Amino acid sequence: MKAHGRVGGQRGIALLVVLWGCTLAAITLGALASGAKVEGIQARGQYLQTRGFYAAEAGIEQAVFRLRAQAASQRWAVDGRTYRLREGDATVSVTVTDEDGKLNLNKASPAQLGALLEALGVDAGQVPRLRDAIVRWGSGGERYSDSLLAKGGFTSLEELRRVPGLPGDVVDRLEPAVTLWSGSGPNLAHAPAVVVVAMTGAGRAAAEAYVTDVRAMDPEHGGLPAVPGNVGASQSFVQGSGTVTIVSTATLSDALAVSIRATVTLQNAPGDPRAYRVLRWTSVTSS
């Protein structure tokens, strides 16, 4: 009886060991399956992001091709209107905005910069301090009445985020309205509504209506609408300066969107094989 009891006990222990081993194996297999699933999701996300990026990049290339088209009927306008195309199963929306419609940080007067900050909705009591902070950036702390940053100047728009005391939310609003690559301007035929407000003193609704009218006109034959506000504000010819910001957003069927914002200058020099030269390039993915 004692021998039989010992055998039965050993069998019970063996059974527990087997059950414990099976449990560990199940846990291990579950962890491996979970890890494989996570890796699969990550791989698919990276695949979709890559596909979206190349679709958005195709939008950039299409815009450059259209901007360099010989026939005016095939050439895209540079006033910010939206063009749409298909790239595989992605829907791509593209806007092209000439840099001459924005305020040049290194050439604008402090008064123009202050007017732009006001048009962006910055509190009037904060405008002088923020304006002066931008003006002093890179100028050794000296004020110049005729131009911003007469010594040094901005070398990139990213430097706005390094200006002491300039809040990030103000930079976010300011960045789409300023440039480093335009002439004396801004050219209101290509300007966003906030720049029209700052340069003409018009109300926001009138400025937005003006921009809408510009984008609705025939870029080849249409005449420009009347400028709202100050009649002395400049409005130049519709033809572009050759330096533009292209925003190409590719949206996939699962709502993943990849957006590329590229500031480029078109190349027209004899013998230069490049269609364009990149001045600034950023990309954002959202879902």
Image: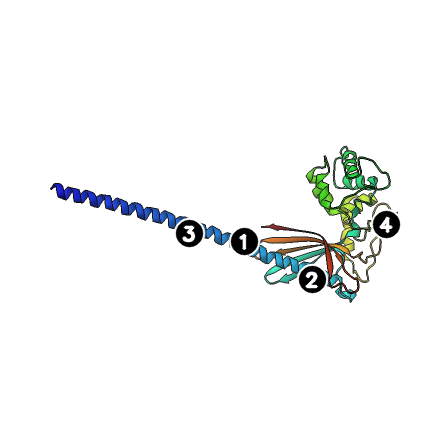
Q: State the SS at label 1.
A: helix
Mark whose residue sits in front, 4 or 3? 3
Residue type, mark 4 in image: Ser
Q: Residue at x 38, y 48 (%)?
A: 28
Q: CA distance from mark 2 to mark 1?
A: 26 Å
Quarter the N terminus occupies: top left
Residue type, mark 2 in image: Gln
Picture layout, residue 147 above or below residue 265: above
Query: Callout 1: 10 Å neighbours few (<14), some, many (20+)?
Result: few
Left/right placement of residue 202 relative to residue 168 reads right
Q: What residue sits right under mark 4 in the picture?
A: 234
As drawn, the label of residue 33 is: 3
Q: CA distance from mark 4 to mark 3?
A: 65 Å
Query: Callout 2: 10 Å neighbours few (<14), some, many (20+)?
Result: some
Report which quarter residue 92 is drawn in: bottom right
As drawn, the label of residue 62 is: 2
Q: Earlier in the sequence, mark 4 or mark 1?
A: 1
Q: Residue at x 51, y 52 (%)?
A: 42
Q: CA distance from mark 3 to mark 1?
A: 18 Å
Report which quarter residue 51 is drawn in: bottom right
Picture layout, residue 116 above or below residue 264: above
Between 207 and 69, the one lying in front of the other is 69
Q: State the SS at label 4.
A: loop
Q: Earlier in the sequence, mark 4 or mark 3?
A: 3
